[in-house]
Image: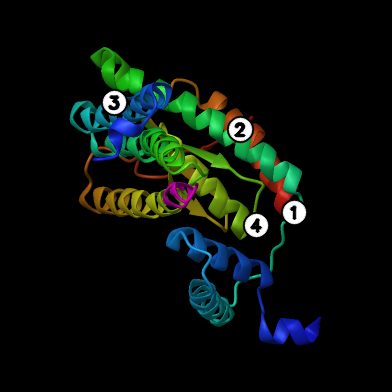
Amino acid sequence: MTALKRVLPYPLLFLALLAMWLLLMQSLSPGQILLGTIVAFGGCWLMVALDPPPTGLRRPVAAMRLAGRVFVDVFRSNVAVGSIILGSDERRTHAGFMSLRLDLTNRYGLAILAIVMTCTPGTQWVHYDPASRVLMLHVLDLVDEKQWARIIKQRYESLLMEIFE
Amino acid sequence: MSEAPDLPLWAALLVSFFIVVGALVTLIGSIGLWRLPDFYARLHAPSLGATLGTGSILIGSMICFSVLQSRPLVHEVLIALFVTITTPVTLMLLARASVYRDRIEGNPGPPEQDPEPTEL
């Protein structure tokens, strides 16, 4: 195991990069597999230089549930923001900033939460202060802060904490 | 596209549906850039095109080329993946830079201090 780790520090990343290369090239020819192996190998050693804190996919079921929730919410919020854009002028005046204290501290978890917040139209991650653990975000339809806080904490943060902590 | 006539009717309808929906959603997002009142509200508009807009067009593309070549083609998923993980970087940078500048210049928009955290 240690011998494998010395040659191939991130086996999963290696496989993912190789798969990405073959998908992009649309080919399974030996030449492309060789090129993909070289690229994936280089990518793994670049990761070693970056020295990221360790993580692991410990809870694949929770990760799938999160992906499903995000998928549904992205669809819903696209419809919501679309109707705000096309609706009456009055509906576009509720935008505003709000803050929220997060219990999640894992860096990967926060990164995923940031991607989710930004990819769902209607919420925009602005600033996170790791010392006070307060996240400031901008919301397009800010009628009830508590409702947004509930959505973020109960729909996403609880699952992310289950996955990463 | 020279191969278009080979597409069976059901596939052609399905592909056109997804591409028209994707184009409409992206168009609504672009209209949002014009109709929304200030910079921070406008930050929300492009993500319509980056999520549902891109997604529908990619699904249309996957169906079209999978039917034409009679084998499943899924490399469009990579486009969705890259768009999803790169757009937040730009939008967060823009938002933070704008908050920083507006606070220094004393412009209306972001609050002087971070708002009090909402407790449940």
- CA separation in Å, label 4 and label 1: 7 Å
Q: Where is residue B103 in the image (x, y as percent from the top left)?
A: 28, 49
Residue type at tag 1: Glu
Front residue of A15 and A68:
A15
- CA separation in Å, label 1 and label 2: 20 Å
Which subunit holds the residue at mark 3? B
Q: Give the range drawn in magenta.
A: B74-80
**Residue at label 2?**
A69
Dot 3 and dot 1 within a common chain:
no
Extreme residue in the right direction: A1
Which subunit holds the residue at mark 1? A
Residue type at tag 4: Asn
| Quarter-of-image position of residue A158 | top right
**Residue at label 3?**
B24
**Residue at label 1?**
A165
| Quarter-of-image position of residue B5 | top left
One can see residue B85 in this view:
yes
Element carrying mark 4: loop
Between circles 3 and 1, the one closer to the viewer is: 3
Badge 1 crowding class, 10 Å Cα cut-off, few under 14, some 14 to 19, many 20 or more, is few
**Residue at label 4?**
A106
- CA separation in Å, label 3 and label 2: 24 Å
- CA separation in Å, label 4 and label 2: 20 Å
